[in-house]
Image (tube, coloured by chain):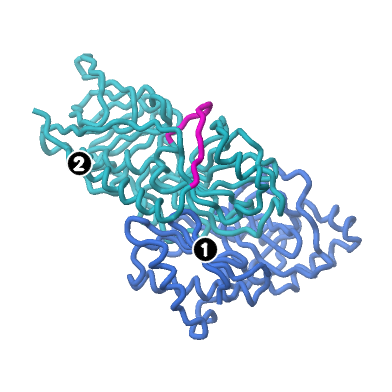
Chain colours: A cyan, B blue
Amino acid sequence: MSKFFFEVLRSGINTTFQDKGRFHMQHFGVTPGGCMDTKSFLIANALVGNTSNEGVLEFAYQGPLLKLAKGKTKISITGNVLFQIIKSNEETINGKCYRTYDLDEGDQIDILATKQSAYGYMALEGGFDVKPFCKSVSVLGRVEIGPNEGKKIKTNDKINIKSNRTNNKNFITNFSNNEKDTIRVLKGPQFGYFAKESQKDFFSKTYKVSNLTDRMGMRLEGAVMKNIVNTNIRSEGITKGAIQVPADGQPIVLLTDYPTIGGYPKIANVISADYDLLIQRTPGEKIFFKLIVLSEAEQLYKEHIKSISEIIKNIKEIN
Amino acid sequence: MFKKLNNIGDCGIVCDFGDEVNRTINISVIKLFHHIKKEVSKGNLDGILNYTPSYNKLIINFDLGKTNSSKIMDFLKSVDFSKLNISQNSKKWTIPVCYDFEIDLANMSKTLKIDKDKIINIHLSTDFFIYMIGFIPGHPFMGDLDSKLFLNRLKTPRVKIPAGSVGIVEKFCNIYPYESPGGWNIIGRTPIKLFNKKDESNPCLLSAGDSVKFKSISKKEFEKLNNE
């Protein structure tokens, strides 16, 4: 057991360990899972000098209040997050995302809320001391797979840290949050199951993100998609971002913890470049879908990856 | 051999083997699945993340940062199906089931007009084939039941079904690996653990393409195996 650890004074709503996910297991019924917002995840790790797939804490809406009970560390918070650092001498620092902070023994980090967004990330220099399952520390809550017995963080848990901070330099990068409401999609394999009028509505009317949204799926409310072929298909493998339409005609976007196979027709699929943007939209917000073609989606993904690399390249020491 | 290749999103491909669902078609899907799995483990298909067989399709998920749809499609088109094998990968299982834990046998007997014991005997004498594993970890979809036992899903799915429950719907039989909601007709329960989180190298007992035969056990034997 690690000598260095945080005490969880408040767990937050849904705080879990995550990395890029667990692959080569979907044929066993194990969904990849992993961080919801890959971009924020990668930048969080890069800021504290970790390798790109080090496990982090992901939180949603209200984050945790953690006390560094033993040890000293360096943290970074990414996303659009309101947080404070309460030093052991009770001095309070209002935190800024996309920079690092040193925490010393007795200091607390209070992650109050995500602003106009759903998910945020906290990375530690050297990482958390958690046990991977099948090469990943991503927690799949529904089937209790992953570290911490596959469960989200609870109040009074201990969170172990791999190692103490090695230097007192701090780092920052430039980042501006994108709150675009247009999500680009490709046609789904059963696009033709839907009436022409519904196809038109899908790309011209707004959809509202409903309260029934979690790591597995985002239920939308808006124009009803009229199925003119069959409201069920033979169950088949699922891809992240698939937009399925059950018999009630209201689309559901399948998110990171998607069921591995599904039997509803899929009208569209969110492109990889816009996925991080989509999952940050919160219940009540409106989104639009725009149809593009595969070659555009591939080009947009290249640009997306390049923009992340540039943010990481621009990490600078704070003087 | 698949009939069509389609994209699904920008990082997925559907190998579509046609609309029919039968063992022959499913075996082709599983052959391709094993081939891809082997190539990936040899490091020949960088960027492929998952390969999910279902009744009549194989879905391939990949990392768009490392590969793309056209590269994988080129590979798929070059596969020589006549050289693919399944027998070396498939296993035969005998799964103990205690029918005393049934929930729906009385109703089934009434609807089907077949004695409870006869239903159990038909189930026990069926050589099941696993078409696919999925939805949740370790969950098998097996067929084919005698058409005499064909039933629909429950009109109102149950909120909670105990782990290990064995259910039937239409020509299919399943086993719930976890306590979960579900709409299948429950005829018994197995003490066998289908997904073992403690065994990282082989957490999932069953695979698509395996065959399964059920063996009736008493409540006492169930309890004994369940505590092992």
- Mark 1 vs mark 2: tell me if same chain: no
Residue A156 place in picture, x, y as percent: 39, 29
Mark 1 crowdedness (10 Å alpha carbons): few <14, some 14-19, many ≥20: some
The residues tagged by marks 1 and 2 sit, at their Cα atoms, a distance apart of 47 Å
Residue A152 place in picture, x, y as percent: 44, 37
Residue B205 in sight? no
Q: How many marks?
A: 2
Residue A190 in sight? yes
Chain for numbered disc 1: B
* Residue nearest the viewer, comparing A102 with B118: A102
List the single residue furthest toward the bottom. Answer: B82
Judging by the rendered image, the residue that carries numbered circle 2 is A163
Mark 2 crowdedness (10 Å alpha carbons): few <14, some 14-19, many ≥20: some
Residue A190 place in picture, x, y as percent: 61, 55
> What residue is rendered at 71% in x and 57% in y?
B167
List the single residue furthest toward the left. Answer: A319
* Amino acid bearing label 1: Asn
Where's the C terminus of chain A, which quadrant? Answer: top left
Q: Which mark is residue B6?
A: 1
Q: Is residue A65 left or right of residue B96?
A: left
Instruction: Read off the magenta span.
Output: A280-291
Residue A289 on the magenta span: yes
SS label for mark 1: strand
Where's the N terminus of chain A, which quadrant? Answer: top left
Q: Can you tell which quarter of the image residue B108 is in?
A: bottom right
* Residue nearest the viewer, comparing A287 with A63: A287
